Image (tube, helix red, strand yellow):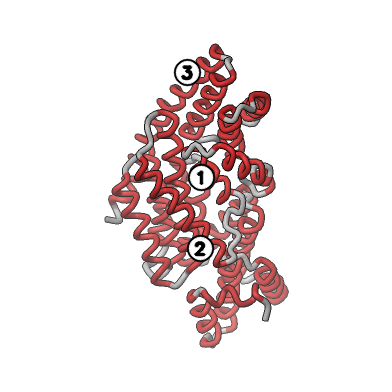
Amino acid sequence: MSENSKRYFRSRIIDTINAQIIASRSNADRNVLFARKAFLLARHSLISESRKLIAELRAVNHNYDARLSAWIMFAEGVIEHSETYNIAKSRDRIIRAHLVGQAANDPTLAGTAAAWLADFDFLQGHYKESADYLEKAFTWSRIADSEARSRACMVLGSAFSFSGDRSSSNKWIGAARSHAVESGDIAMQNSILFNSSALHVSKLSLVDCVGTVDPVELNFVAMSAQSASNLNDALGISNQPSMIPVQRAEILTIQKRWQEAQGLFDSHIEQLNLQGQSKWAAKFIAHRAWCKSNIGDYSGSRSDISLALELIDSNLDPDDLCVLHSRVAAALEKVGDFAAAARHRVLANQSLDEYSRQQAVVKHLFGAVASQRD
């Protein structure tokens, strides 16, 4: 047995579904369980095994059974996301699975797909849509539907973190972790740890741009990021492969370890486009411009400033946009272009104001969802 084949047996949730497959006396139910297994394999980065299983299920789905077809679509959406991180392609399959899951009265599928859609929409800044899908995720799913409940709670934790409510964020991230631990879903635990680390690093980058970073908090965030990286490596799960090192580079930037941060940015920024993470590339390039300006590479800093401004994504969240313009302004001051720096300080402040407005919107929308679940 290859090392890749061994990996998923570390996750108890795979063992559980294997036992359910063996115990099933219905061919239709067994095929659905196999489709659910394909979904789980994809989340554990066992893409080839997952694809093979889906191909076999398509071959036997002669009558296009609604439940099986929906689970196949859902698994294919997750395979797409696990392999390419392309939200648009993944979302199309998963939304169809969600709709068919409702029509076929499969609450596990309807609820789990809704939780994924809530996650996708939140990442893209579509907060009203995310909150609506989150409500559907909780309504359709049951407590035993660990993936649906864990992912839904993680989205709530992310929303409260965005809105600045750390206490509520910790509560819902803790609930997400509890669902994942109880079901033995190590891949979901890994996602939660990465997501929590990413939220902390993003917040600290903003603080570093507009205020003063608490050294104790910086140390905590650095350790959290290292823990996320260690677990991901130990499991062999390709969870955001370039986002983990650039997250580390962000921390090094805050720590003023300019050369080390630049090296990590150099090694991984270009991969973001290949892994569906191009939305954040401009921000990371702005970080790199700031690093270069601090080690005297003014020509390189100017090049990165131009590239960062050229690559600004219209979907970039206002807090990330504030960081981008703040880093650009600071780098411009280092290279002596004070007039341009002043313009970017204004843009940074405008983004910070917009962030405050969006925080209030997110707190209202997701607070309403959470209030029905407390």
Q: Is residue 294 above or below residue 4?
A: above
Q: Given the image, on which type of amino acid does mark 3 rest?
A: Val
Residue linked to disc 3:
346
Q: Is residue 292 visible?
A: yes
**Residue depicted at x 59% and y 73%:** 7
**Residue depicted at x 54% and y 11%:** 339
Residue 261 position in % (x across, y down) = 57, 41
Q: Given the image, on which type of amino acid does mark 1 rest?
A: Leu
Q: Quick one: label 2 or label 3, which is nearer the N terminus?
A: 2
Report helix, strand or loop for mark 2: helix
Report helix, strand or loop for mark 3: helix
Residue 37 position in % (x across, y down) = 57, 73
Q: CA distance from mark 1 to mark 2?
A: 23 Å
Would you identify the image quadrant in which residue 142 lies?
bottom left
**Residue depicted at x 37% and y 32%:** 212
Q: CA distance from mark 3 to mark 1?
A: 26 Å
Q: Quick one: label 1 or label 2, which is nearer the N terminus?
A: 1
Disc number lying in front (1 or 2): 2
Residue linked to disc 1:
123
Q: Which mark is residue 231?
A: 2
Crowd band around label 1 with a 10 angstrom C-alpha radius: few (<14), some (14–19), many (20+): some
